[in-house]
Image: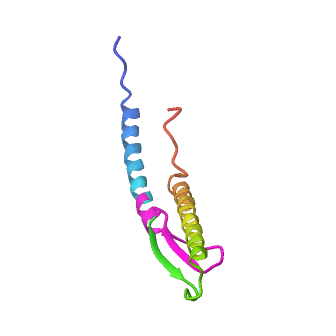
Amino acid sequence: MAREIDEAWIDEAIERYRQIEQLRAEFEKAVVGHTVSVHSPDQSIEVVVTASGDIVDVRLHGSLSHRDTAEFAHELKAVVASAAEAARWAREKLHGEVFGSFRTLEGH
């Protein structure tokens, strides 16, 4: 027995695929363009990271001349870890904003 083809469902699926591709492109553009700034626990290092996880700027606050190298390395590691977490958070937030109202084909 031949299966009946639902042309309307196929047309809707194709349109939804186009919408998904458009939203995906919008999301990718937003992820690259959105930045988050985080600071080390002692506030001496600031890192600016995109939602895609790329570090775009590092700013040092205060003098480094009297700084213990082990302490500085600890602060640097902490702020880089915070930057990675901030990028993940920003991606999730942007994903919710871009795809949040998109409904699925389930139940059709």
Looking at the picture, how far across and down is residue 44, in whole percent?
60, 81
Up/down of 57 relative to 105, above or below: below
Looking at the picture, how far across and down is residue 62, in whole percent?
58, 88
Q: Quadrant of the N terminus?
A: top left
Looking at the picture, how far across and down is residue 2, in whole percent?
34, 14
Residue 107 among those drawn in magenta: no
Residue 5, image quadrant: top left
Q: Judge left or right: residue 50 versus residue 15.
A: right
Residue 32 among those drawn in magenta: yes
Up/down of 3 relative to 10, above or below: above
**Residue found at x 41% / y 33%:** 9
Residue 54 seen from this side: yes
**Residue found at x 41% / y 59%:** 28
Magenta segment range? 28-53
**Front in this rendered view, residue 25 or 55:** 55
Looking at the picture, how far across and down is residue 46, in whole percent?
55, 77
Up/down of 57 relative to 65, above or below: above
**Residue found at x 59% / y 87%:** 66
Up/down of 74 relative to 52, above or below: below
